[in-house]
């Protein structure tokens, strides 16, 4: 087992909790597990037992993990007296992995934005001193940015310079991409013309693409039509225009179109970064 540096435990108290998801870098693979370093906890060393790598029987651990690999693990054991932490790979679901990687990447991007804001603001304080305030007041850059964007009580009472907070919002807005609205339809299209039907369909699909509608072949005679716009009306208008082209150019054949229900994505003020 590995030891937790006493200065980390006594001074910063930044030790992951049981059940917490963490980003781990596989540092050294052994016969019965692997030593990992937690990227969010100052490279704190933890142990990944072989029994926690996979639910199935493991003949060769190298078939499941490799040194230098970044993985999402769950903290499953913490012995304060012995100073050891165990993590599990098999107890993390695919959904948890995706969400954790997303939140980790967001935190790193906001950290970079924070550093850039300090430089642009030309503050005299060192990055480290202001970073300590972020950790003590908000816990993370993500929490801080949400508070600043919401202008809540915690942000208003923060000791972080107002100039810096304003610059972060300004840079955030400058880097925020335009929101795109997407609509998708399933189109059934075939020609009864046995001689030139294939050529006719190619011409129709080409004309549809020229209207800004993406065409993806599913299986005969079905196609997926995807359109984007600054709003739903604009996206729908492109599909309507494409539909009119099909109806006018298809001489004899089968044509039908049905809107595809897209899974709704959770929106957040932080998504754009």
Image (spheres, rainbow, N blue to C red):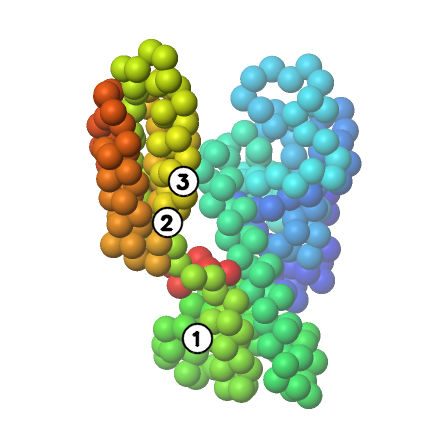
Cβ atoms under marks 1 and 3 closer than 8 Å: no
Give the quadrant of the N terminus.
top right
Secondary structure found at label 3 = helix
Closer-to-camera residue (241/224): 241
In the displayed structure image, the side of residue 201 where residue 69 appears, left or right: right
- Mark 2: few/some/many CA within 10 Å (<14, 14-19, 20+): many
Mark 2 falls on what kind of element? strand
Q: Which mark is residue 209?
A: 3
Where residue 8 appears, as percent x and y from the top left, is 68, 60
Q: Is residue 185 visible?
A: yes
Q: Which residue is mark 1?
A: 148
Circle nearer the N terminus (1, 3): 1
Q: Is residue 18 in view from this perspective?
A: no
Q: Quadrant of residue 257?
A: top left
At horizontal 70% and vertical 80% (from top left) the residue drawn is 126
Question: Splitting the image into 4 quarters, where does residue 115 fall?
Answer: bottom right
**N-terminal label among 1 and 2:** 1
Q: Residue at x 54, y 46 (%)?
A: 101
- For residue 228, the mark is 2
Query: Element under label 1?
Result: helix
Q: Nearest the camera: 150 or 41?
A: 150
In space, the residues marked 2 and 3 are separated at their CA atoms by: 12 Å
3D distance between C-alphas at marks 1 and 3? 43 Å
């Amino acid at each position: 087992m590995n030891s937790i540096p006493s200065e980390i435990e006594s001074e910063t108290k930044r030790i992951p909790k049981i059940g917490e998801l963490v980003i781990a870098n596989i540092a050294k693979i052994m016969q019965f597990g692997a030593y990992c370093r937690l990227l969010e906890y100052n490279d704190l060393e933890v142990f990944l037992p072989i029994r926690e790598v996979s639910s199935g029987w493991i003949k060769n651990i190298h078939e499941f993990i490799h040194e230098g690999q970044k993985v999402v693990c769950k903290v499953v054991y913490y012995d304060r007296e012995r100073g050891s932490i165990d993590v599990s790979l098999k107890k993390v679901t695919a959904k948890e992995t995706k969400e954790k990687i997303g939140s980790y990447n967001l935190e790193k991007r906001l950290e970079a934005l924070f550093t850039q804001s300090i430089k642009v603001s030309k503050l005299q304080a060192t990055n480290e001193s202001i970073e300590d305030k972020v950790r003590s007041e908000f816990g993370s850059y993500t929490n801080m940015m949400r508070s600043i964007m919401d202008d809540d009580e915690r942000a208003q009472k923060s000791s972080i310079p107002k100039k810096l907070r304003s610059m972060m919002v300004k840079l955030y807005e400058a880097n925020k991409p335009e929101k795109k609205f997407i609509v998708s339809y399933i189109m059934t299209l075939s020609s009864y013309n046995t001689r030139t039907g294939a050529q006719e369909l190619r011409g129709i699909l080409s004309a549809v693409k020229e209207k800004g509608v993406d065409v993806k072949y599913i299986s005969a005679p079905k196609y997926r039509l995807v359109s984007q716009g600054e709003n739903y009306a604009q996206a729908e208008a492109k599909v309507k225009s494409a539909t009119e082209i099909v109806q006018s150019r298809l001489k004899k054949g089968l044509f039908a179109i049905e809107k595809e229900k897209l899974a709704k994505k959770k929106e957040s003020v932080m998504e754009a970064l």
